[in-house]
Amino acid sequence: MDLCATPAVELARLIRARELSAAELLAAVLARIESVNPAINAIVTLAAGQAQAAAAGLDARAARGDFAGPLHGLPIAVKDLAETAGIRTTYGSPVFASYVPSFDAPHVARLRQAGAVVIGKTNTPEFGAGSQTFNAVFGVTRNPYDPRLTPGGSSGGAAAAVATGMIPFADGSDLAASVRNPAAFCGLVGLRTTPGLIPADLLDPMGVVGPIARTAADAALLLAGMCGADAGVPLARPDRPGDFLGLRPAPLRGLRVAYTDDLGDLPVQPEVRSVLAAMRGSLEAAGCVVTDAAPALADADEVFQVLRAARMAARAPLLRDHREQVKATLAWNIEKGLALAAEQIAVARDGQAEIFRRFASFLADGPYDVLALPTVQVLPFPVEQEWVTEINGEPMATYIDWMRSCSRITVTLHPAITIPAGLARPGPAPAP
């Protein structure tokens, strides 16, 4: 059995049946990383010694019939934006290139409590700014299907590591598109979770943590290990992790689908539209009721730009003290935030509330069970290109404008999932 190609749910079953040990699985994963990672550069900090000690402790517990939780013995590498106690956390910034925190981010603490073995960190752009994974500390991460192309971002290291079998699943964080975009570029499942489902940001519901996996069942398993109430995070929901265990596929017949390949006005490359058209046919063949319909979300673009910039303004000390080490797009976004007037932020927050209500009404009035739309508007692009500057000849004014099919959904505060729909061009599948 190739453990690195085995679904996480099956690995969890084997460990609980005592047919596989955490140490054996970790050894397979470390060998896989040694073989594959040099060409992909997805895992940028490896904590093998800490992981081996954790796996040994979990195996000792299992020998006593005691299991830590749903992720007992399963290896994971954490996105390098989340703090990991005793493991370097750089945020993709040369300013923090040697930073080793003494604490875990809330969802990382939950991962450990659930029995996950943290093996290291996955690459991310500087402070997660941008959907192309590169930084001055570790360099660029490459797409497993074609190393000349980007895996997307900002959870690009996470997606590339999962697609190549270096880890069975990974955590990601998502503000504009940072779970959904790399999942789409690497042919994976990526879930932008409901705000508060996984303890994350103290007060802002737009930035969330979510799972990236090769299957929906594996994503649900990882979600079970990260979700739940947290006394230190006011927005954390009291969801029960067990609700996400043992999920089975729901029947598609009768599912009411609102379908759009451009959200009404977005430029989308023809190759992307072609793949989506084939998927629409598959939904109809499965018995879904598919209707051409799109909610009015054009005003979400300005709301997103303002609220994102307001978040970025918190990085002002970084820009003031280390400007020469901050990439240009991040500096621009921080300065945009600092230039905002209080009225602009207040209007944007009111606008978001209205957009949330409008989107909820769109689903209820259809009525529609889901909205199907493109996760990405473009195909993966060369790693030398920092961001998409035009789509179908239409200029993109900023480094985040090319991912509006995701950022508009962010503003609605609804959950969203990326699922593989097909390959836009022939190419080798990533190992395993």
Image (cartoon, grey):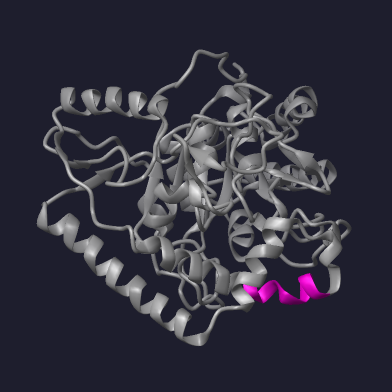
Residue 200 occupies quadrant: bottom right
Residue 2 occupies quadrant: top right
> Magenta stretch?
313-320
Q: Residue furthest right?
A: 98
Q: Is residue 62 left or right of residue 216?
A: right
Q: Is residue 354 above or below residue 360?
A: below
Quadrant (top left/top right/bottom left/bottom right) for the C terminus:
top right
Q: Is residue 282 above or below residue 109?
A: above
Q: Nearer the viewer, residue 194 or 298?
A: 298
Q: Residue at x 43, y 38 (%)?
A: 377
- Residue 23 point in image, percent of width and height: 73, 35
Q: Is residue 347 above or below residue 280?
A: below
Q: Is residue 267 left or right of residue 75?
A: left
Q: Nearer the viewer, residue 261 or 109?
A: 261
Quadrant (top left/top right/bottom left/bottom right) for the N terminus:
top right
Q: Residue furthest bottom?
A: 342
Q: Find out whether residue 226 is within the magenta segment.
A: no
Q: Residue at x 18, y 45 (%)?
A: 293
- Residue 411 point in image, percent of width and height: 39, 63
Q: Residue at x 58, y 60 (%)?
A: 107
Q: Nearer the viewer, residue 248 or 38?
A: 38
Q: Residue at x 80, y 46 (%)?
A: 53
Q: Is residue 339 left or right of residue 43?
A: left
- Residue 339 point in image, percent of width and height: 61, 78
- Secondary structure, magenta segment, majority class: helix
Residue 277 visible in the current orientation = yes
- Residue 428 point in image, percent of width and height: 57, 13
